Amino acid sequence: MPLTLKDSSLLKGQAYINGQWIDADSGATLVVDNPANGAVIGEVARCGTAETKRAIDAAEAARPAWAAKSAKERAQLMRNLYNLMMENQEDLAKILTAEQGKPLAEARAEIAYSASFLEWFAEEGKRLYGDVIPSTSPDKRFVVIKQGIGVVACITPWNFPSAMLTRKIAPALAAGCTTVCKPANSTPYSSFAIAVLAERAGIPAGVINIIAGVTNEIGDELTSNPIVQKVTFTGSTPVGKHLMEQCAKTVKRTSMELGGNAPFIVFDDADLDAAVAGAMASKYRNSGQTCVCANRILVQEGVYDAFAEKFAAEVAKLNVGDGSQADTNMGPLITEKAANEAEKFVEDAVSKGATLYAGGRHELGGAFYKPTVLTNVSADMRVAQEEIFGPIAPLIKFSTEQEAIDIANDTEYGLASYFYSRDIGRVWRVSAALECGIVGINEGIISTEVAPFGGVKESGNGREGSKYGLEDYTEIKYLCMGGLDK
Ligand SMILES: NC(=O)C1=CN([C@@H]2O[C@H](COP(=O)(O)OP(=O)(O)OC[C@H]3O[C@@H](n4cnc5c(N)ncnc54)[C@H](OP(=O)(O)O)[C@@H]3O)[C@@H](O)[C@H]2O)C=CC1
Ligand SMILES: O=C(O)CCCC(=O)O
């Protein structure tokens, strides 16, 4: 189906630098297509080093005036952008579904989630309090103030192209920082649409700059240019490590929101129906392409068979198809290559003794893959070790609480974990023992703008959303005032 919008000016394919919409210097473009059917959505300016430098210079030039505004003035402009996003929710959702593939209902929810970061941080920016430290001497006073860190580079992935952008730019703007953003090349339109609305909202030129294009050139410049003070990234762990290495040369601050391998533990004492509902929401949201998706489902032996049966019955109800169709509740993966990767995970597991309980390759072919359930999964299988990033649920059997904790923590990742139990002692014990940044307890959906999102171990550093997310965009400055007795 062609992409028809109420406001077609939201579909913008040029880069946004210093308040201007520009083509790449070379005139080059990159093609963006719809993962559901391969149809070309449009072509986007393919920028490189020179345009990135100009974007950084624009952000630096805009910074003093933006930082000098009161938090309340910045909040008003951010609130304008929040309102515009919500007024244009349907068009933004259609753009998101077209380039990313998720069902329209999920896309609408992502736009609301995305806008919520602007609303939250607009308000939170007003509460960027400092400190007065009791003095050690009568002629001195010690004061701590917090200031925006400076120009921030935001590099965002294709799985949540709208929400990951605002989760970065909203705290940056609230703290008085300006930004240069690099969306994923496969999903740039959602970001450009936000820039169109930011302009309408009255956010000054240079405060938000957005460029897509030659990935390495843009990444190298963002991580090496001395003007950039912070790089915030959401994406794969290997790319995150590479960016951190590059940032080390100019000692930039980083926030890294990287891969996950979330355990989802169902204990014998769980409410099984609630656990099934939580697992469905956590596993199949965005076709399993979320860093906090349940990756390994650990089920205690007493309820393993009953859980598998109930879970597979729910999986059978999912309707896979083009996300723009009203009856679709699971879309394609981002590319056909991703569907092939999903198939390799399943082949590896089955070759090592797993049972394909439900799902597998989809008749639609291309980027489509069925919601899949594997039983009899063991620790040597790739599905038990790696981030799947697809709609495959491996069910692993365990006997004791300690065994579940050991399996859960046996990974280099540490982003989200989930468990279902009605035993309050177990709830505290397991919460404390899990090595991760987020724990869903009798809950499969943990994301909200008001709570800290982020991981430990190789899942990254820093927190996004919440009051902690604002701190990540500030520097602490200690003012030591002397000579006060004169
Ligand atoms: N934590 C998460 O939410 C995500 C995790 N992943 C994991 O990563 C796997 C691979 O996905 P993939 O898309 O390759 O993820 P990447 O980490 O490669 O991509 C995420 C973002 O990083 C950008 N990027 C990649 N290399 C560089 C670089 N050298 N400098 C600057 N920016 C760079 C990409 O740009 P471009 O689009 O131009 O390549 C994109 O904007 C997934 O299967 C999943 O396991 C992926 C996405 C999100
Ligand atoms: O990094 C991701 O995979 C996006 C997380 C989406 C969310 O906030 O739930």
Image (tube, grey):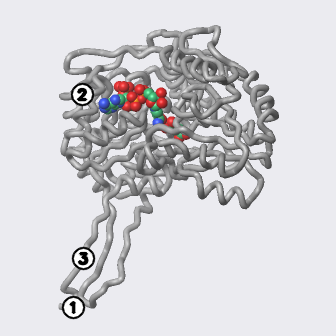
Q: Callout 1: 10 Å neighbours few (<14), some, many (20+)?
A: few
Callout 3 amino acid: Cys
Q: Position of residue 357 (x, y in %)?
A: 72, 22
Is residue 43 depicted above or below 248 in this figure?
Answer: above
Q: Nearer the viewer, mark 2 or mark 1?
A: 2
Is residue 348 depicted above or below 273 in this figure?
Answer: above
Query: Label 1's element?
Result: loop
Q: Is residue 469 left or right of residue 134?
A: right
Q: Looking at the rendered structure, which numbered label has been put on residue 485?
A: 1
In the picture of the structure, the residue carrying the numbered disc 3 is 480
- The residue at the point 70 percent across, 22 percent down is 355
Quarter of the rendering occupied by the C terminus: bottom left
Q: Earlier in the sequence, mark 3 or mark 2?
A: 2
Is residue 457 depicted above or below 381 in this figure?
Answer: below
Q: Looking at the rendered structure, which numbered label has been put on residue 217?
A: 2
Q: Position of residue 237 (x, y in %)?
A: 41, 36
Query: Label 2's element?
Result: helix
What separation in Å lies between label 2 and label 1 (alpha carbons)? 56 Å
- The residue at the point 26 percent across, 30 percent down is 218
Q: Position of residue 273 (x, y in %)?
A: 80, 39
